[in-house]
Image (tube, helix red, strand yellow):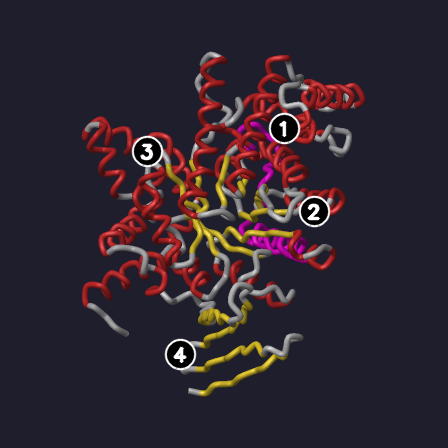
Amino acid sequence: MLTIKHFYPSVSTICLCRTLKLSPQSIYFLSTKVDSTTNENKKQETHVQHPALDTRFNQYRIAYRYRHDMELLRGYLVFRIFSINFLVNHQDKIAYWGRRILGNWLFKTIFKITAFGHFVGGETPQEIKPVIKRLQHHHVKPILDYSVESDDHIPLVSSSQVDHMHDQNATKFIECIHTSHDVCGPDNLVAIKVTALVRPNVLKKFNTILQSMKNHSSLPPLFELINQQPTNNKAVVLLQDSINTHLINNQNQKSSKVTLVPDDLTEIYNLLIRLNNIAQACLKYQISIMVDAEQSYFQNAINYLATELQRYYNKSNIPYIYGTYQCYLKDTLDSLKHDLTLAEKYNYIFAAKLVRGAYMEQENRLAQEYGYESPINPSFEITSQMYHTCLDEVLKNTLQRQSDQIRIMIASHNEDTIRYAIQKMKDYNIPHNSPTVSFASLYGMSDYVAFALAHAGYLTYKYLPYGPIEVLQPYLFRRAQENRAIFAKADKDRRFHFKALKDRIFKSKH
């Protein structure tokens, strides 16, 4: 083996040695860090060794070390089943008749040991703890996701029942933050959905009004006002005054026909209080939240609220609030540029997750039904181009601002996008373990990418949903429908699950 050593003298005349070892199969980087202790006059050396990344992502043995034998078999079968379009297209009917024929208990049991078990961490915080420990053992950090959300079409129930449900959801998110701190430690992430905290029709109205406003600078600083006077609804009063002024000046616009009645304003006020309580829990437990993107008829409002949260809470050296940008939307780049400018203007950390998007079929169907232009890019290639352009825009800002003022998460299962991001990190001299750029994927998908990245020292996350089966079944079915193209082409996932299982059975040592 050939060993090449490079020495870098420091001011304190202690040499830091970086050793590069070359072998026929892998390239390893070994860094030596020297720390001085105050209590004892000793030097402590910490060696961190990471193999170079195989950007073909073929290291399946690394990918599935955290999976048991039966989990590998289950994964292979689940990917086989989800690649059959007929089953994915009719999954609601199959689930309905499955419950009728098998009974609720047996159906839930089968569902839990198959698709639910592969893509979901568990039903309770206790159930997900072993999964978290296994991920962490292989240097993958979990993003806990208590997956509750609502759409525009929900049964009409009393206002008090709805308020109670939203309060319960806010409590669950706070419990999730607490669990993340207790199990994972500080400096971790939790995902939340705004539609779990407010009536969808109110959020939709709010979205329509905000969408019509080219400039939100006339709106008050919501969370600054709420934290000044928590028991006062001054923030909502000022918000309503700003909206009314806008509506009077733009009476011909579609938004002028949308009004927020007193009950709507109460809903928005309660939403702001819930979001603020969640953000306060983030401060208490040193955990960040990721505000997930949702359907386009909610997204302007969600993005506005996430930005307002960042404006108040991302002022310290910790980015407590992350937003999300869906690159399949035509206006994403403009929205991203606007928010980067705001972050620089008000001097807070810009933190965001880039995704392709998860509601494509629904968005296109609604546009066709109601006769408006689809907000979705016309092709996968254009969406990929949008994704890469958005990433470029964020990384350019690392040159204008200090690098610790920018956080960007590449949430993608696409290997080309991952390779593009890695190359950009090299172009901008961003170390592979820098918090500026991180990578994320869904639990149970693309493990051969995620664990290879983590193995090579990149900051890597897995979105780990958990919650009751009844609540998560729609989430899983939507994932299956929106990712049907991925599942249909998931030959690599299926093949690697099978190869890893075969290696286990025959005890392959190669």
- Distance of mark 4 from mark 2, alpha carbons? 42 Å
Q: Residue 469 carries which label?
A: 3
Q: Would residue 489 be seen by someone viewing this image from the given angle?
A: no
Tell which circle, 3 or 4, labels the residue nearer the N-terminal end. 4
* Amino acid on which disc 1 is placed: Asn
* Amino acid on which disc 3 is placed: Ile
Residue 451's place in the image compared with 218, above or below, is below
- Distance of mark 2 from mark 1, alpha carbons? 21 Å
The x, y position of residue 224, in whole percent, is 69, 31
- Distance of mark 3 from mark 4, alpha carbons? 44 Å
> What residue would you read off at disc 1?
207
> What residue would you read off at disc 4?
25
Residue at 59% in and 52% down: 408
Horizontal side, residue 245 vs residue 391: left or right: right
- Dot 3 surroundings within 10 Å: few (below 14), some, or many (20 or more)? some
The x, y position of residue 448, in whole percent, is 39, 60
Q: Range of the magenta residues?
A: 367-395
Residue 68's place in the image compared with 127, above or below, is below
Tell which circle, 4 or 1, labels the residue nearer the N-terminal end. 4
